[in-house]
Image (cartoon, rainbow, N blue to C red):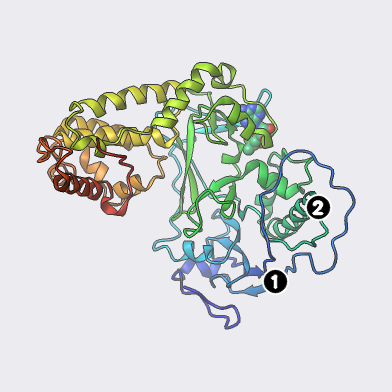
Amino acid sequence: MKRGFLNGSKAKARPLGPALAAATVLPSLVIAPGTKAEKFPIGKRNVGEYHVPEGYSQPMRYVERDARAGSVPNAMTYTTLPVGAREDEPVTECFFYPGSKEVVMNLPGFPKPLVHPATPAFRLSSTPGKGLGLFSARALKQGDHILAERPLFVTVRGIPVSYPPSFTREQYHQHAMNEFERCLEFSVKQRMRSEDREAFMALKNSHKEDGSGPIVGIVRTNGMRLPGLRPDVDEDSEFQYTAICKDISRLNHSCSPNTQPRFDMLSFSYNLFAVRDIAKGEELTFQYTDITCSAAKRNEALKPYDFVCTCSACKDPVASDARRMKIDKFGAPSVYMWLFDHRRPDDWILMECRERLASIVREGLEAVGEYSRTLTSAMEACIALGDAQGASEWAAKLMKVKWDESKEREALDAKLELEALLDPASLAYPAHAMWRKRVDSPYKDTRRTDPMRMMKMMQEVGALANRDGVARPWGMLF
Ligand SMILES: C[S@@+](CC[C@H](N)C(=O)[O-])C[C@H]1O[C@@H](n2cnc3c(N)ncnc32)[C@H](O)[C@@H]1O
């Protein structure tokens, strides 16, 4: 739904409940963006003296509008979500590209209230050599919910700026950071609730010497990727969002993290889960970078955070690097590839999955997608073999992987399919697209020299792998 700001149309995105009457509604503000966005550099730098000629500063023309109105085309939006929140309800300050506000406001059921664990599961404490960190307040089981939290701030990762052709690259970067700081100041200094601003400004800043302003420094130190608000832009693009939280941003890094956050758009909150059992008092950690690559690559990627990782995988990287490389390279075994490939034994997928899971658990990589993909492969292999009992045991393991944000999991959750598969007597088994596909395969005697039959088989594999519109990896047959 697009609305121009000149006609001042009021949004009907969310029915206005009675809470609004008692609520403070901050107006949404928009500014006109400039010309170019680029990733900011890291490390100390010497930019030298420079002058920004007139016309090259972000114009920052604010247009005040009804908070419930949508985005303005070609302009950035300052807003607070959820719109119309009560004073005691947590809110997020947002600095958005056009369109993102609608993604949230048009979600049926938004905003869902936050759901917290029944008893506190974490505490904040200092940790030697790392500053502050989060620790478990009680013993936690894999899949336990640790905390739910709306971010203090969600922002674009940089803004497009105009710059004169005479600028060096360094000067351009400094100019871009100054302009970004100016834009973010408006959110933090003018719009954020005072207690949220205090919490935000108290967060760690590891970018005090690289030209970042105080707000940009905190954003760069504490920001976590937040996918889903720009469905048309690649998830890993620099034109996506970063979120800064009061508590989750206190998690320190580990290359074998024991927690993983998952963002829930409907409640606009991160939920933090234990990815394996955690003892009372253990430090809670998560990964700041890809952890399936080598220790050298990980530590290169961690440089902007200004520390060298001393986790056991980094201290003794030789065997760990080899295992991680194998996990990363091979990928979860493709059930679809094996389904009609009768040169492979019936238990091939399960053996592969067990070996891979042992490696993943040994490296402490339960947080990565490969873990849930491998569990899914094992479950689907059992279904294809007509083994409902075995499949239900894998389904129970998958149920605990609450942090999985994959499309496959989304599809399973949307139909409550996993819950149904927990019961081996469930009718969900005979109704499953993969049920007995391997044991009842009509392709047992298919030869590679029979192209028509091969084609038919490939089509069937493709349809199974892409069911529900979810593209599952299935590799090549034979
Ligand atoms: C997002 S903050 C984490 C919370 C932070 N420790 C604090 O005091 O608020 C990131 C910063 O924490 C520190 N840090 C995180 N993980 C670390 C680790 N494994 N070893 C040492 N320092 C770490 C670094 O200073 C990093 O820039």
Neighbours of disc 2 within 10 Å: few (<14), some (14-19), many (20+): few
Query: Which quadrant of the rendered structure holds the C terminus?
Result: top left
In this rendering, position of residue 432 left or right of residue 81: left
In this rendering, position of residue 464 left or right of residue 357: left
Residue type, label 2? Thr
Residue reaching furthest to the right: 49
Residue at 84 percent across and 68 percent down: it is 54
The first of marks 2 and 1 along the sequence is: 1
Residue type, label 1? Tyr
Residue at 66 percent across and 49 percent down: it is 39
Residue reaching furthest to the bottom: 7
> Residue 462, how many percent across, how many down?
25, 48
Element marked by disc 2: loop
Kindly tell me whether residue 139 is visible in this rendering: no
Question: Quarter containing ligand 1?
Answer: top right
Q: Return the mark for residue 168.
A: 2
Quarter location, residue 107: bottom left
Residue at 73 percent across and 68 percent down: it is 60
The residue where tag 1 is placed is 62
Please tell me whether mark 2 or mark 1 is closer to you in this view: 2
Give the number of callouts.
Answer: 2
CA–CA distance in space, label 2 to label 1: 30 Å
Neighbours of disc 1 within 10 Å: few (<14), some (14-19), many (20+): some
Most foreground residue, 205 or 312: 312
Q: Return the mark for residue 414.
A: none
